[in-house]
Amino acid sequence: MIPPGETIGILGGGQLGRMLAKAAAQLGYRVHVYAPEADSVAAEVCARFTNAHWDDAAAMAEFAADCAVVTYEFENVPVGPLKALGSVPLHPNARALEVAQDRLNEKEFVEQLGGRTAPYMAVDTREDLDAALTRLGSPGILKTRREGYDGKGQWRINADHEADGIAFSGQPLIYEGLVRFSAEFSVILARGHDGRIAFWDSAENVHKGGILALSTAPASDAVLAQVEEARALAAKVADGLDYVGVAAFEFFATSDGPVFNEMAPRVHNSGHWTIEGAVTSQFENHIRAICGLPLGDTRLAATKVEMRNIIGEAAEDWAAILADPANHLHLYGKGAARPGRKMGHVTRLTF
Ligand code: AMP
């Protein structure tokens, strides 16, 4: 067990790190953030900040020397430089990063465990894409295998001829057939050192333009009917990776049952509602798990919880949001609002 008072290292400096740091502080830990960007919103709420590139081995080793345990809030941290952490434990482990960083690896891993995915094919060239369109047909979505998020690095192909406009840059891609779904939902779990798994209620998620807009818990009956099967798969993945910490799995609810879309080896936007809407939040349980502490109660703390993202330059009336006692406002302290940028969220509880 890593006792309160010790220092937790967080790789990545965004809003997930900010919310993790706040949860860590509540339990008496100090947080050291490591991020390549100077304007880190996590660094604003932590004890120490290392602003260095991922491959700066000296900076990484110095960071590790200050930490009792290291975690990450960003799944695209390159795995190679993590060797510089030496003997300091990394939770979740590097294997979880390797699997989740590549959409092809992730789908293959999940299929081996008996999970259902969208039909897919790896695509590196125009010829590969033609073969994928012949085999899987259109409509579909061409995605970068690595580093895509919030709908970035994705091209919708509604008809085969639309493939003509796509420029290939040598980046590995994956073509996925379009899944017909009635709803989207996530399974978020925390897994402790002892292998014990706790699930939160599954939120039903609405995306706009590939970006999460709204999460609601409890989900509709159509989703609830698929949660058990989705949880069983998520638990197999977590066990298979010997995972420690919080992980999120996104699913489509379809007439064939739950179809796995992707996993995040970290706390997740569709779990932000747990800060006020669950007895213990995903952030606190992540800290508890990586420090070897008992996991907290994940049950709902209200009858209904709704989390809405504040995205881009949308004009918001902060005073009106705060004037309603049902609302809980979280702003991430990001300077410039840009289209698609997540600036904060509002959680609304109904008792
Ligand atoms: P992703 O970045 O893979 O999570 O995709 C973002 C969003 O795009 C998903 O939450 C879905 O709304 C949509 N999407 C992605 N892949 C597919 C697919 N194969 N079929 C249908 N919708 C998809």
Image (tube, helix red, strand yellow):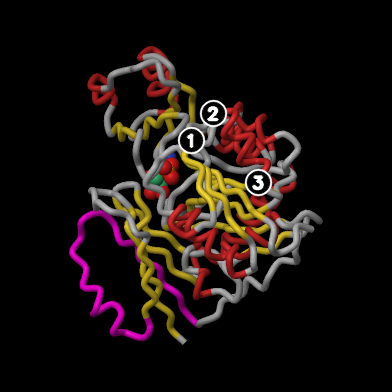
**Residue 102 visible (yes or no):** yes
Residue 123 or residue 134, whichever sits in front: 123
Give the residue number, with chain letter if any, for mark 3: 66
* Disc nearer the start of the sequence (1/3): 1
Magenta stretch contains residue 275:
no
Q: CA distance from mark 3 to mark 2?
A: 16 Å
Q: Residue at image x 31%, y 80%?
A: 322
Are circles 2 and 1 on residues that touch, CB within 8 Å? yes
**Crowding near pointer 3: few (<14 within 10 Å), some, many (20+)?**
some
- Compared with 134, 65 (above or below) is below
Kind of residue at badge 2:
Asp
Q: Position of residue 127 (x, y in %)?
A: 38, 12
Q: Residue at image x 75%, y 63%?
A: 293
**Crowding near pointer 2: few (<14 within 10 Å), some, many (20+)?**
few
**Residue sitting farthest toward the left:** 315
Residue 12 or residue 296, whichever sits in front: 12
Give the residue number, with chain letter if any, for mark 1: 52
Kind of residue at badge 1:
Ala
* Disc nearer the start of the sequence (3/2): 2
**Where ligand 1 lies, by quadrant?**
top left
Tag on residue 56? 2
Find the magenta span and give its range.
303-326
Q: Residue at image x 24%, y 51%?
A: 336
Q: CA distance from mark 1 to mark 3?
A: 15 Å
